[in-house]
Amino acid sequence: MPIYKKGQGKYTRVVTAISAVALAVIAAMALSSFLKAYVGSPIIQFGIPAAMVVAVGLFVLWMVNRPKSADFLIATEGEMKKVSWSNKKEIVGSTKVVIVTTLILAVVLFVVDLVFVFLFQRLGVL
């Protein structure tokens, strides 16, 4: 099978294929343990999951080389190259802001909750 636009979108195609096959392997392991409980034959227990992994691998290879899918992956890789990624200092600073804001919000909600508990107890609702 010829590779559609061979030199383009290499990394997104490879990562997509590896991820799909990894998910298939995880599913095959689950299927194998399921079959172990119901079928005593190791040929069935390991053969069906192995065939499933091979089938998924071939399907993914076909999918990443279809013109529509390949063009999407090529465009995705092109867009990812345009992204300006934050440096470590910006990420650490942003993370600190999020943590402090979350803690402040938690304290404010705790105080509001205490006020409502006190108010409802005085009104006899609780």
Image (spheres, rainbow, N blue to C red):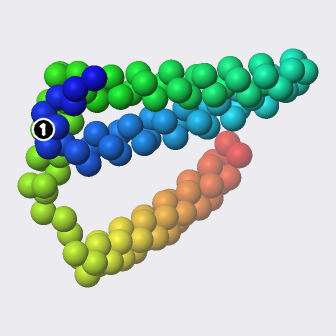
Q: How crowded is mark 1: few (under 14 residues within 10 Å), some or many (20 or more)?
A: some
Q: Where is residue 57 in the image (x, y as percent from the top left)?
A: 46, 29
- The residue most toward the right is 40
35 on left or right of 62: right
| Residue at image point 48% right, 25% down | 56
User: Residue 71 lies in what quarter of the image?
Assistant: top left
85 on left or right of 58: left
- Taking the image as drawn, is residue 25 in sight? yes
| Residue at image point 16% right, 37% down | 6
- Taking the image as drawn, is residue 97 in sight? no
Q: Where is residue 50 in the image (x, y as percent from the top left)?
A: 63, 28
67 on left or right of 34: left
Q: Where is residue 112 in the image (x, y as percent from the top left)?
A: 50, 60
Examine the rendered structure and indicate whether residue 106 appears above or below residue 49.
below
| Residue at image point 52% right, 40% down | 22
Location of the N terminus (image quadrant): top left
Observer-nearest of 30 and 84? 30
Examine the rendered structure and indicate whether residue 42 appears above or below residue 19.
above
Observer-nearest of 25 and 105? 25
Q: Position of residue 121 (x, y in %)?
A: 67, 52
**Residue highlighted by disc 1:** 75
Which amino acid type corresponds to the residue marked 1 in the rendered image? Ala
Q: What element carries label 1?
A: helix
Observer-nearest of 68 and 107? 68
